[in-house]
Image (spheres, rainbow, N blue to C red):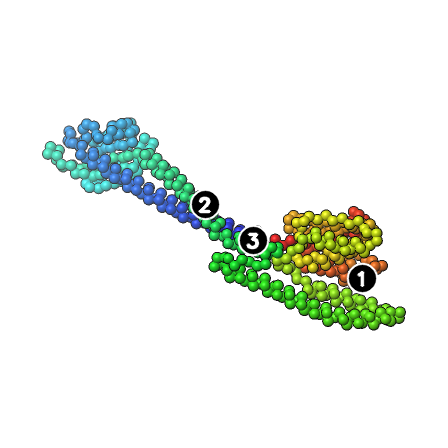
Amino acid sequence: MSSNGGLSLHRRLLLGALVVAVLFLGLTGAALDQAFRSSLAQAERERLQNHVYTLLAAARVEDGALRIPGDLPDGRFAQAGGGLYGRISDADGDVTWRSGSLSGLQWPRAETAGPGDLRFGRLELNQEQARSLGYGVRWSDPDAGTREYTVEVAESRLDSREELSAYRRTLWGWLIAAGVGLLLSQALLQHWGLRPLRRLVRELRDVRQGRKAQLDAAAPPELVPLADGVNRLLRAERERRRQYQTSLADLAHSLKTPLAVLRGTLETGATHGASREGLEQVERIDGSVRYHLSRAGRSRERLGEHTPLRPVAERLLRALSGQRTPVPDMELDCGDDVVFPGPEDELMELLGNVLDNAVRHCRHRVRVAATVAGGSELEILVEDDGPGIPAHARERVTRRGERADTRHPGEGIGLAVVADLVAAYSGTLELDTSPLGGARISLRVPLLR
């Protein structure tokens, strides 16, 4: 299964935690802000009532009207534009007293309030928003008799707004800090919580690359069934491979003796045309059997196996060098860390067929290079200075039984085996012309990551 570019588990969890934190802290901040504004409004109403009671305590009847002689305890009543305003009006709406803070200001005419009524409202004074309160009273005086008045006070909301702004800055600052802290804590917890999964991924990679035979048993309870299932799968794959190899070995042994007897019989009469033709057919049958046995015994991906390439290539070159006289110049360019993602026998078969082809057809020189391209693909290049493979024959020679050069003996299955083996590893085989003048065979095999 390949990645489709989706979010990782860690990022999914972090994104979910971010959404939850934003929603939770946002709703919490909104609720706290609303609660503070409600308490601030309640405090404003209570202050206005206290100011009304202060005015009533200082009020006196003078010249038949209710007034407030002298100074009031809160000096803002006397300071022009001080932010605290007051006035008293009679039942007809005529103002009997105005605080000094109203000097030069117009207070809209208000409806009179009945005795005991409290009327809260908002107005604009001195280009400032203010909250107001009107309170109706019935005042009795021995000289003036009983009359009804409305006592009004108003207070600028500037201080309240500044207090609200300061509260909001503090509130949201702490909430943002808390959110960042929560996300960092969540990231650390997730990093710690997902550690077993990361360890499991590393162990799987080690198994696929052959550094381990199976997954460790030490895992959290939630991952134990997964680890056990993978280990059972690995054991089953090895057992199936062993059974395949045993069955194929038995088949090869059962066919070997009859073919040898038949070949010997035909070789005895090889002077006759029919015998020669029969011998050729036996050789083709023998090659075909070996070819199909090789295909049947090959798995597409062998878990847990990899083979260093350089030692195998060196052994093959030494063995093949004895087939030619004089010995051709053989050049190998391969690092010690280059590995083939499969067992040694399959690497021997793949590389052996390609090198055998190059050594048999070269004039003086064979060059082999193996590198890891992009960290994810093994590339093997085998070049020679022989006659090469014509362009029209390159596709044909990778089919079983087809040969570009009929002058050399063989069943014509070498490159076909290579093509099948490379395809089994999801790789590619390319035939081209080498700068040396002969054939250039390029093998690309994905590495198991």
**Sequence-first tag of 2 and 3:** 2
Q: Where is residue 72 in the image (x, y as percent from the top left)?
A: 21, 30
Instruction: Inspect the image, locate mark 2, and give the three-letter code of the amino acid beneath it.
Output: Leu
Contact, CB < 8 Å: mark 2 with mark 1? no
Q: Residue furthest left?
A: 142
Whole-number angstrom distance, CA of label 3 to CA of label 1: 46 Å
Q: Which mark is residue 184?
A: 2
Compared to residue 41, the image places residue 299 above or below, namely below
Instruction: Inspect the image, locate mark 1, and give the three-letter code of the amino acid beneath it.
Output: Gly
**Mark 1 nearby-residue class (10 Å; few <14, some 14–19, many ≥20):** some
Compared to residue 4, the image places residue 109 above or below, namely above
Whole-number angstrom distance, CA of label 2 to CA of label 1: 69 Å
Residue mark closest to the camera, 2 vs 3: 3
**Residue indicated by mark 1:** 410
**Sequence-first tag of 3 and 1:** 3
**Residue indicated by mark 3:** 202
Q: Which mark is residue 284?
A: none
Q: Position of residue 58 (x, y in %)?
A: 18, 32
